[in-house]
Image (tube, coloured by chain):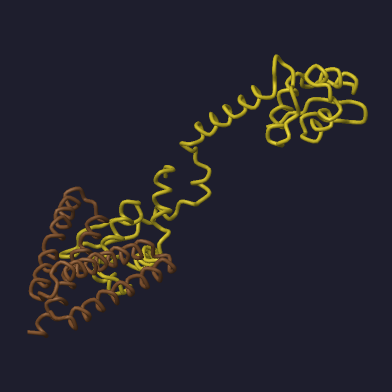
Amino acid sequence: MDRKNISEFELYLEEQITACKQRSKQFIADDRMDEGNFEKVRGNVYEIFKTILSVAERVCGEDNLAKRRFFLQKAEQIPMSWIDSREKAEQHGDVEKMHIESIKLDTIREIKAMCMQIWEETT
Amino acid sequence: MTEAEAISLFKCLADKSRLQILKSLAVEDMYVERLAERLGLTAPTISFHLKKLSDAGAVTAYKNQYYMMYSLQKEIFQTSIMDILQQESDEAQKQAQRDADYRQRVIDTFFEYGKLKSIPTQLKKERIVLEVIAEAFEFDRMYTEREVNIMIADFHDDFCTIRRDMVSERLLGRNGIRYWRMKND
């Protein structure tokens, strides 16, 4: 993942954040409050990983392999608590929480897939 | 329907997607995937909404071969909003207690040893004060203006203002030169 690809990945994350914000606004304006909030949740996940990408850049300097490793490691670690949280919600029949955790996990899956795709394009 | 159930139902209905689901179920019973296809939403989102609707008592589920079918709980929607509004509120007693506490605070503030210290500026407070003074009058008895003035003067020197305000607040009735205490519901 060189500088060009990191920029591409950053752009992808930014686009997703903007799209989530727009959809959230549209849903809320359309009296679909819950779906509006789900889009905010999705947008937050993109925000988190955009921050992680910038941390990876700062921490790993010019070492592109290290950046990728750092990013993917976080992309594995962070969702662990989401998985736990979803399981707990399932045990307690908390459908809303389950749905929110599922959205977060689906989003990180997409982010990881995009990261791999961009990485593979450069190797 | 209890007040809590009504609140839960109204909250649940205040969402376009859930309203669309109910509209679809009003046509016929459906399963999650069918609703998802019809409304252009994902199946997990539909499941989420159905759970909320089910918790609010708006829909019920039953198994039909491989599918979990959802149907509209029609009885809930046959309840009129007026029925809900006319139901005894869990809050009614608390509200009455709050009103009584407020009334007592006003009385304690404006009366001292049975005398009115000053006429409240706020209409709500003045009304309470006037009600207290009205209690000195008997029902079903006619009073002359002089009698009224003397009775009010026991509370406050400005008996003219108070007398006029008691008439305008319909606590006292007036017919030419006679006054009487009015019955208020």
Q: Residue at x 32, y 71 (%)?
A: A20
Q: Which residue is drawn at 80% across and 33% down?
A: B165
Q: Residue A103 sits in which quadrant?
A: bottom left
Which chain is assigned yellow?
Answer: B
Instruction: Check the image and report above or below for B72 versus B111.
Output: below
Residue reaching furthest to the top: B113
Residue B173, image x, y percentages:
82, 30
Q: Quadrant location of the N terminus of chain B?
A: top left
Q: Quadrant location of the C terminus of chain B?
A: top right
Residue A1, image x, y percentages:
12, 79
As drawn, is B158 to the left or to the right of A44? Answer: right
Q: Residue A52 sits in which quadrant?
A: bottom left
Q: Residue at x 58, y 27 (%)?
A: B100
Camera-side residue of B125 and A63: A63
Q: Which residue is drawn at 52% across and 45% down?
A: B85
Which chain is assigned brown?
Answer: A
As drawn, is B129 to the left or to the right of B73? Answer: right
As drawn, is B136 to the left or to the right of A5? Answer: right
Residue A77, image x, y percentages:
12, 60
